[in-house]
Amino acid sequence: MATLANIFNQFMDAGRVAEAAQTMSSRVVSDDFKLRSLPNEDVYFFVKRIDNSRVVRQADPGASAKSWKVLGASCASAAMLIGMLLPSAYGLLASYQLHNLQAENQRLNTARGKLDLEEAKLVSPERLARLAVDQEFVDPKSENVVYLAPTNEGSLALNRR
């Protein structure tokens, strides 16, 4: 269709081309401003619509077997790949966990050292003596102390019910 339209345009434009040639001959035209032709400017494509709605596809009896084989092979290769990469992934995760445990151990050792230092400060004899004076915890006088004399009568307590 596009080629037919161009043919008609050539016939219709023949008169106009003759008039343009006369006017061109009367004036001088410089070739400096002419554009060169574009590549494939003279090529026209004809597009024809093809209707395949009435075409019925024939069943291939071996296609389903091939597709199941491809699916099984891809699943098996994926399982093998996962099986090969799984130990290294477990090792990587274990190293992360080991690093975290070491950091936690270091943190806990530091906290234990701080607590030991604080405990040593709290139970130091100088501090305990100062607290005893502040809270009036003094040793009793010797006449106020009563010593119990152990009496051994030979009897022992029996736990009977």
Image (cartoon, rainbow, N blue to C red):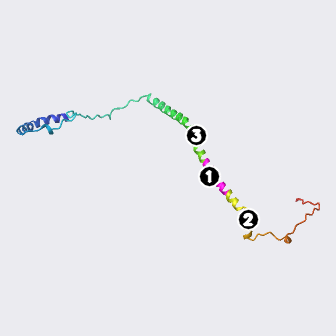
Which numbered tag is attached to residue 7?
none
Task: State the image coordinates of residue 81 (x, y, percent, origin top left).
Answer: 52, 34
139 or 41, which is in the foreground? Answer: 139
* Residue that mark 2 sits on: 128
Distance from Cα at disc 1 to Cα at disc 2? 30 Å
Name above or below for residue 103 compared with residue 132: above
Confirm whether residue 81 shows in the render.
yes
Name above or below for residue 51 compared with residue 152: above
> Which callout, 1 or 3, points to the residue nearer the camera?
1
Left or right: 33, with 114 as reference point:
left
* Residue that mark 3 sits on: 91
Task: State the image coordinates of residue 100 (x, y, percent, origin top left).
Answer: 59, 47
User: Which residue occupies 72% across, 67% down?
Assistant: 130
Distance from Cα at disc 1 to Cα at disc 3? 24 Å
Dot 1 crowding, Cα within 10 Å, few <14, some 14–19, many 20+: few
SS state under label 3? helix
Task: Name the residue furthest top.
Answer: 62
Q: Give the range drawn in magenta.
A: 101-115
User: Which residue occupies 57% across, 37% down?
Assistant: 87
* Main SS, magenta residues: helix
Which numbered tag is attached to residue 107?
1
User: Which residue occupies 60% across, 45% down?
Assistant: 98
> Which callout, 1 or 2, points to the residue nearer the camera?
2
Confirm whether residue 1 shows in the render.
no
